[in-house]
Amino acid sequence: MSEEKEAKKLSGARELAAFCEKVLYEHKAENIIRFDMEGLEWAQADCYIVCTGISAPHIGALAERVVREVRAEYAVRPSAVDGDPQSKWIIVDFGNVMIHVLTTEARERYQLEELWNDAPKEDCVRRLEEEHRRRSPEKE
């Protein structure tokens, strides 16, 4: 008999965003940035996450992994997944959290950071690396 893990309850967009950032980081996404959009009239979600994959297959794998792990952890499915690896840009829409997974070329071309420069942003890689260092025992 297999035991199914009970899904956790989400406390909000920030918790979901933090979980997605961790999944992306663990699967080698690069330059992960979170934009906090709460209070911005034009924003369609509370958090936008932008990250880079090293190739078209990698961005497909990153998007698929986020969808799978969020479903396993919180029993939440995205309302939409748009794009494909060949388009070099995939959007995973969880409603209050939108994730943009792009190749380096697409990220340079579309300049999403410039589009959303009035929103507070966080370099998630720096924070996640610091958290990883704190959890890892010092090597002697």
Image (cartoon, grey):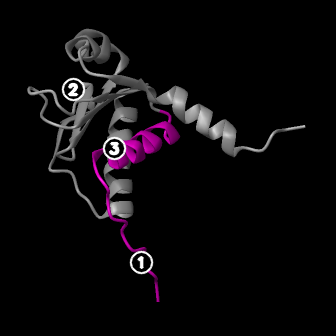
Q: Look at 37% across and 17% down and name the residue there.
A: 104
Camera-near label (2 vs 1) is 1
Q: Please tell me whether mark 3 sits on a helix, a strand or a loop.
A: helix
- Estimate the spatial distance between the alpha carbons at disc 2 and disc 1, rounded to whole Å: 36 Å
Camera-near label (1 vs 3) is 3
Q: Sort mark 1 into few (<14), some (14-19) or many (20+) by Cα contacts within 10 Å.
A: few
Query: Extreme left residue here?
Result: 42
- Where does residue 138 sit, x and y in percent of width and height? 81, 39
Query: Compared with residue 111, is residue 137 higher up or lower down, i.e. above or below?
Result: below
- Where does residue 12 sit, x and y in percent of width and height? 28, 51
Q: Is residue 15 magenta?
A: yes
Look at label 3 and name its amino acid: Arg
Q: Is residue 110 visible?
A: yes
Q: Please tell me whether mark 2 sits on a helix, a strand or a loop.
A: helix
Counting every numbered tag in the picture gives 3
- Where does residue 16 sit, x and y in percent of width and height? 33, 48
Query: Compared with residue 119, is residue 64 higher up or lower down, i.e. above or below?
Result: below
- Return the residue at label 3: 14
Q: Is residue 53 visible?
A: no
Left or right for 91, reference 102: left
**Residue 132: quadrant of the picture:** top right
Left or right for 59, reference 109: right
Do labels 2 and 3 touch, CB within 8 Å? no
Do labels 1 and 3 touch, CB within 8 Å? no
